[in-house]
Image (tube, rainbow, N blue to C red):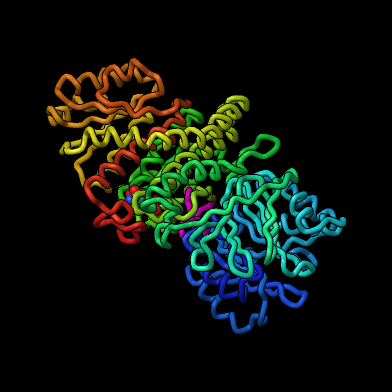
Amino acid sequence: MCGIIGTTGVDDALPILLEGLHRLEYRGYDSAGVVLVSDGVLWRARRADGTHSVEELFSLSGTAPAGAHTGIGHTRWATHGSPTEENAHPHLDCTGRLGLVHNGIIENHSELASELVAKGHTLTSQTDTEVLAHLVEDNIAGGASLVEALRAALLRVRGSFSVAVVHADDPEVIVAGRRATPLVVGIAKGGTLLASDIPALLGRTRRMIPLDDDQLVELRPDSVRITTLDGEEIEPDVRTIDWDLEAAQKGGYDDYMSKEMHEQPQAVADTLLDRRKPDGALVLDELRLTNEDLERIQKVFIVACGSSYHAAMVAKYAIEHWTRLPTEVDIASEFRYRDPVLDDRTLVVGVSQSGETLDTLQAMSEAARWGAKVLVVSNVVDSSMARKADGVLYTRAGPEVGVASTKCHLAQVVALEILALTLAQIRGTQPAEAIALLLDRMHELPDKVEEALGRAKEVDAVAEAIAGARDYFFLGRGVGFPVALEGALKLKELSYLRAEGYPAGELKHGPIALIVPGTVVVGIATRNGLFEKMLANLAEVKSRGATVVLVADDDDDEAAAVADHVLWVPPTEPLLSPVVNVVPLQLLAYRLARMLGNDVDRPRNLAKTVTVE
Ligand code: M6R
């Protein structure tokens, strides 16, 4: 997730771009950069100083050409290529007369890069983006206008993009386009603007046009022309935005948690992008291990904390089932001190949204000390863990502001299941057709998550019905067990209510003594091999007076028959079901917390990144 800003004609471009970048920093701040069009040339400045990147650009203002009224800027959340200045946007073409910024992922960048290099282009970064600048350059050299050159380039790319381009030969024009990532046009006095979101433009204008997928826009100081990628003219739909700045930063949602829950379909889709080569081989982001190393592995450990630990638990089921590799899951703070048995045939996978959690970081160091192969699943490119590990698999969820993890947790489950399939492929434990089918099912997950999110009102009604209960149990079996743990953790963190996650079959060995009339039991009862047993366990709590809330597959009357309330979800493959099933539990915890008046973005006593033992 990166941020894009552009302006032409409004006023001096640089202060507008810097102010916009400042407001877009929540979308990532690995690096920032701007290009101004001035006197027939481009002036570019880029900085890669983490949280200080935009600030550093401010300090360069004195060296910028005066009076430039057209420019584009970018703040980066690195996906392809480290967060260095060389990889920072805007990227230039070979002539240095074209500047381009991009948010999203170009899936076929490798094949496009090979083609461009063969034609004589010089690529200077490790990003997926740079190919776009050279594709547009190529089309212009063939006689196309800037807008037609971008159109032709975008028709060749697979993946997601919002992209903006300027050219020294067209000093007052910005051309931009989008697919699957946001872009909004602003109409101001004397000029026009462009940004990844509304807040970046508030203060300059309230008159905005949100672009739709596969649309291109040509911005000039006095006009906005929108066409589809196929060239059809579109009548601009100008809206007046009446949100205040804070509401706008949350994208119109009441809080970051809500916004981030609604970004989950995108986070899952982005994490899946670009994983399958044309020959069907699966690829991780940075793997400093050979296939031979992975073939030699005899045992897997996955270490993590909190929600990342629950994602790791799901992965244990997937890895053992698909690869037959013995897999242990460990709480990071326990792993390090319990003298685990590790050697160079052990794979240790650290899972961490931040990539900085001290317990997980130290567990990984311990694993490396014993000669184990170390992989990390992280949301932050070049985080401490990513730098230490032998291999990295990134969850591409974008920055998560809410302290309670939502979109990163879902992306972790997806990334770990890709890792499980990669191991199955390399070790030959699953036929190619089975892997292809599972990947197809995984690509259906964003829509299913979207559907589950669309049922928030039904979840709210359940929350109203059970509010006031003192004790909550979350029960699951198989992959439903980590879902139950995650549901209980969300409820604890957000609502401060007593909630226990438990394996449903274990309840009768003790904790069932706590079930009394009024206890709420939330059961994960979507269809899998343990469905009948799960219903039997639920009957045990129901007969003791518990109020039973079930997460169940759509139209499953058998499940509904044992429930007081049902949270319906669209069905999917059992091993993939945690990605969908956790969504109603997030919504339930959110609603109960809001009803209690709690701050869902900053729950008491917690921190987003825990860098102490
Ligand atoms: O950054 P990490 O994934 O390593 O963080 C791990 C936990 O601290 C984190 O998941 C925590 O439990 C969240 N508050 C869960 O919502």
Image position of 105 with respect to 585: above or below: below
Count of labels in the image: 0
Q: Is residue 516 above or below residue 136?
A: above
Q: Quadrant of residue 544?
A: top left
Residue 117 is situated, as x and y percent measured from the top left of the image, at: 80, 55
Q: Residue 197 appears at what percent x and percent y?
A: 52, 57
Name the quarter where the N terminus is drawn: bottom right
The residue shown at (67%, 67%) is: 221
Which stretch is magenta? Answer: 377-391
Which image quadrant: the C terminus? bottom left
Q: Going by the image, does 383 lie left or right of 611?
A: right
The part of the image, by quadrant, that contains residue 556 is top left
Q: Residue at x 59, y 80 (%)?
A: 61
Residue 607 in view, yes or no:
yes
The image quadrant of residue 443 is top right
Q: Is residue 379 magenta?
A: yes
Is the residue 95 above or below the residue 325 in the image?
A: below
Question: As rendered, which of 580 and 509 lies closer to the eye?
Answer: 580
Looking at this view, name the residue that lies furthest to the right: 142
566 horizontally vs 575: left or right: left
